[in-house]
Amino acid sequence: MISALALATLVCIGDSNTAGGPWLSSGTPTYAQILECDCNVSAHSGFGVIRDPSFGGAGIEVVKAAITEALFKKPDVIVLSFLTNDVQSLYRIDQILEVLGQRYRQARGRGARVLVVPPLGRYVGSGPVVRQWRWKRDEIRRRLIEQVDVIDIVDVSEISDDDYAEPLHLNGLGQAKLAAAVVGMLE
């Protein structure tokens, strides 16, 4: 899998599914780490991951600084995966998509290929809050093409409800499937 990316500089920008956390079993890598990303971007000359600098803030609040930092690395590919937290935020869908489009164009304007991971999340149940989050996730996914070229949207259809450790966090298998989907976009 990694041979396809061996000569590319790849930067993964995202929220907790990119950075990892306690929901993953000890030693289980995130999709970014599977792509041989190093969580300390300043100490690595090739691949790198930039964590959500707010450690839990809504994606649209923090991703601009992360992209600006990433562009100094002159990456070939930037993977944006910050929409998951925005599903549960108070931001309207139009606001989320507008900011996504700005960040996407910001990164592409510097010559990088930009891949966008649609919002993730396993929302099971029938309560009104869960129904609202599920609708918002699906609506953002549906409307991504308003701001992002369809060829740059990572296909997450292989990720199922069984691939989550918690409602917002992928387990090891889910992380591997997301890494494979990103590689599939680059081959």
Image (spheres, helix red, strand yellow):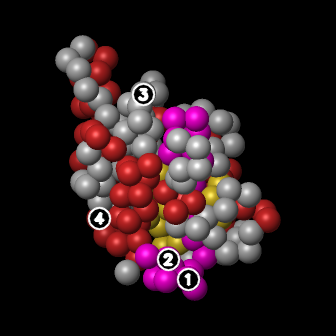
Q: Which residue is mark 2?
A: 2
Q: Earlier in the sequence, mark 1 or mark 4?
A: 1
Instruction: Identify the image quadrant of residue 127.
Output: top left
Could you tell whether 54 is left or right of 173 in the image? right
What label sits on residue 67 in the rendered view?
none
In the image, what residue type sits under mark 2? Ile
**For the residues bearing labels 2 and 1, Cβ distance under 8 angstroms:** yes
**For the residues bearing labels 4 and 2, Cβ distance under 8 angstroms:** no
Instruction: Identify the image quadrant of residue 146.
Output: bottom left
Q: Which residue is mark 4?
A: 150
Q: Which is closer to the viewer, label 4 or label 3?
A: 3
**For the residues bearing labels 4 and 3, Cβ distance under 8 angstroms:** no
Residue 62 seen anywhere in this rendered image of the structure: yes
Q: Which residue is mark 3?
A: 88
Front in this rendered view, residue 37 or 141: 37
Structural crowding at the residue carrying mark 1, measured as other residues with C-alpha within 10 Å and reported as few (<14), some (14–19) or many (≥20)? few
Q: Earlier in the sequence, mark 2 or mark 3?
A: 2
